[in-house]
Image (cartoon, grey):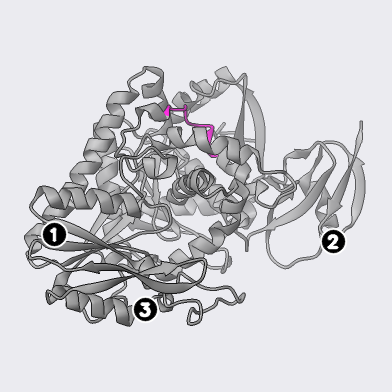
Amino acid sequence: MNNITLTFTDGKKIEVSARVHGKDILGHLPKKDGTLVAVKVNNKVVSLCRPIRVSSKIEGVYLASKEGSYVYRRSLSFILAAACHKLFPKDRLLIGHSLGYSYYYTLDREKPVTKDEISAIKDEMLKIVEKDLKITTKHISYEEAIEAFNRLNMPETAKQLQFRCRDVVLVNSFENNTEEFCDIYFGSLVDSTGILKVFDLMPYDDGFLLRFPTAEKPDEVAPFEDLPKIYQIFKRYKRWGKLVNVTSAASLNEIVSRKKINDFIDICETYQMQNYAEVARQIHDRGNVKVVLIAGPSSSGKTTSAFKMALQLRAIGYTPKTLSLDSYYVGRDRNPKDENGNYDYECLEALDVELLNQNLIDLFDGKEVDIPSYNFDLGQRYYTGEKMRLSPTDILIVEGIHGLNDKLTPLIKPEYKFKIYLSALTQLNFDDHNRVPTSDNRLIRRIVRDANFRGKSAAGTIGMWDSVQRGERLHIFPFQNSADAVLNTALDYELPVLKIYAEPKLRAVKPTEPEYTEACRLLNFLSHFNAISSDYVPKQSLVREFIGGSSFKY
């Protein structure tokens, strides 16, 4: 058998036989505190039970890391699925969306899950943990996989295999699996169940939440913070998905293969526009709204949403005018810096709140004001002579990350403000037990937009994504529940469109780059969708903000 060379992060090198397993080389990893859950092989996360075939750079993946927390959550989901199958073999376990540091699950039946049933599921999961069962990956034939998932009551998983037809299928199972339970997870799992001690289950609505730790505090379950408005929007879209019979990537792929995608795109766009119209009517019914504040995380579609909201408000008698928060930066000489000494343009203190509020007060009093502009190259404010005055039918639309924070507009009466939060909450799952993360949807949008309009590589976008998300956690997410309305900007057909643009960029990320880990995960993510040509995308679609060709002028 050929030998290969493994190089560790401390520079140590060893020569071993090809196809050595990660668990066989743990003693050579540099000493580090924390729970090891997987290894990186040439910047790709793999399970400890997977063989290493070529000479590689090796790095440990620990629970107190982003990649490690993903591995832990997938592994918890696996033992949850096994426990539910044992207790309720006739009821399908369905994963929903994330809610804080939790995943929402239901059983596909008429009656809600009871507290006693949730307690029984948790007890069964704890038994699996106590037994410290080895989690293995193995290849089975296509026919065996179809038969297994139909037998295990996972019809969406079986259906998805029909659109990814391979002669062998990689499945997860327990070693010495007497109950013949197996599942598919699109990423590595832990080597054995004994380390999955930190979790909880709690009732929520008609289902329950699988709660797990954060990467920052891996030894305790994260505190639960309810997001009722976000949950209700998700529930509404999930119900709509069932009505149109598209709840998974497999269902969507089926529509593409039947050449019915044009009709489905029209349905998606019409439904989304109805929701914008509904919010516009809420603004009208309030009667005294003078400014609409639109906020949302990166790539949630704020700019297009401002255009669409303006159209809806025009249709009911308003004359919308827009004001950009980008014009109100304080200037580089006053701009705060972050802990690394870089200018922090995402904190509230980077904006001239005093000037913004004075301008708004003057506008609402019928006065004419000079509207500032900002030169990002020089880091200075300047004036072009642009002026603004509001008539009785005019309404301001302001979009920016601090829109929901009342500290942005402390001098403006609450009744004058209508706050809209945007979130890209896709209701699709990959299959029965694998969800489509909202943050991944937004990251792929941003990779495509950055490549198309900013000349940035996928590695560049991925590299700054953690910083972007930190800003969202600080400045946007804490204010979600203060919104007067929540709009879902996800379109269930968009990922098959975006994949055409994203995949070539992701494939260009080199194995020597640290972003390769995420690029591989996203490529796997996108591989489950059949492509849809951008020719089908309407000119006013929100998707055009990222791929180009919009009739709106950005």
Residue 94 appears left or right of 420: right
Which one is nearer the viewer's eye here, 345 or 41? 345
Residue 205 makes an appearance in the image: no
Name the residue tied to disc 2.
10
Which one is nearer the viewer's eye here, 389 or 29? 389
Mark 3 / mark 2, whichever is N-terminal: 2
Q: Amino acid at mark 2?
A: Asp
Nearer to us: label 1 or label 3 = 3
Name the residue tied to disc 1.
283
Residue 414 appears left or right of 326: left
Residue numbers of the magenta segment: 525-533
Mark 1 / mark 3, whichever is N-terminal: 1
Q: Residue furthest front?
A: 385
Task: Determine which of the numbered discs, if any, sits on residue 121 in the image.
Answer: none
Q: Amino acid at mark 3?
A: Asp
Residue 360 lies, with reference to residue 544, above or below; the image says below
Name the residue tied to disc 3.
352
Q: Are marks 3 and 2 in contact (CB under 8 Å)?
A: no
Which one is nearer the viewer's eye here, 110 or 47? 47
Question: Quadrant location of residue 407?
Answer: bottom left
Main SS, magenta residues? loop
Q: Amino acid at mark 1?
A: Ile
Q: Quadrant of the N terminus?
A: top right
